Image (cartoon, rainbow, N blue to C red):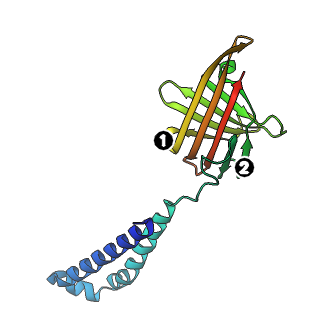
Amino acid sequence: MTADDRLRGLLSFLLACGHTVLRGARAVPGLSAIWEVSPVIKVLRRVLPPMMVLALVGCASLGTKPAPSPAPDGPSNVVFMAGPTLGKRELHTNKCRAGQRLVFRGADIYDHTTKEVLGLRLVVDPIQGPIVRIFKDAEFGPSIVLRSRDCRTLTYKLEDTGKSVNFVSEVRVAVKLDCRSRSGDIVTGNVDLPACE
């Protein structure tokens, strides 16, 4: 059963209930005279059913989501995003830095071949779990923040490679995303980078 079938069934049910209520109001002795005579009731009888249908259709359409670009099983090291915060973009990831440099468990992932600053930060919080932040232009610019509750898929691997550079442990990072932020941004993609220093 599709969402459209469910919506049609719900609308049919509500219209049937509305007609039953209207018939019942006419049958009550004190209300029947008011029901037939009152101009307000006459207007409500004509306007209310179509307004209920429009309201239900509007509410149902708010819950629908546009399909995200590619699925998270798509190309590796590309993150697709679309929405009001950063617009429609692709982040081709090819470089990363261990979060230990900035005193957090995780990694900053970005494309070092472009002049535009667009980065993905994976933070592994000991209480909330993985949090992904995608930011543009600067760490303090506009950003999308995604938690597990915002995602159908948010998996990660953060493994120590056993090497260290300038007392910073090198890590391998992998992230798989299929998320929709509370502000309506859609983010999907795969990242797998072998060495973040």
Within 10 angstroms of label 1, few (less than 14), some, or many (20 or more) residues? Answer: few
Q: Which mark is residue 89?
A: 2
Measured along the vertical axis of the image, is residue 128 above or below residue 184? Answer: above
Q: Quadrant of the C terminus?
A: top right
Q: Residue furthest top?
A: 167
Q: Residue shown at 54%/36% (left/top)?
A: 155
Quarter of the rendering containing residue 116: top right
Residue found at x 70% / y 33%: 109
Query: The residue tagged with tag 1: helix, strand or loop?
Result: helix
Say what secondary structure mark 2 lies in. strand
Q: Is residue 145 left or right of residue 194?
A: left
Q: Is residue 8 left or right of residue 62?
A: left
Amino acid type for the residue under numbered disc 1: Arg
Please report the residue visible at 14 percent of the width from the left and 83 percent of the height from the top.
29
Residue that carries the numbered disc 1 in the rendered image? 149
Q: CA distance from mark 2 to mark 1?
A: 23 Å
- Dot 2 alpha-carbon crowd within 10 angstroms: few under 14, some 14 to 19, many 20 or more: few
Amino acid bearing label 2: Arg
Q: Quadrant of the N terminus?
A: bottom left
> Is any part of residue 104 visible from this angle?
no
Q: Earlier in the sequence, mark 2 or mark 1?
A: 2
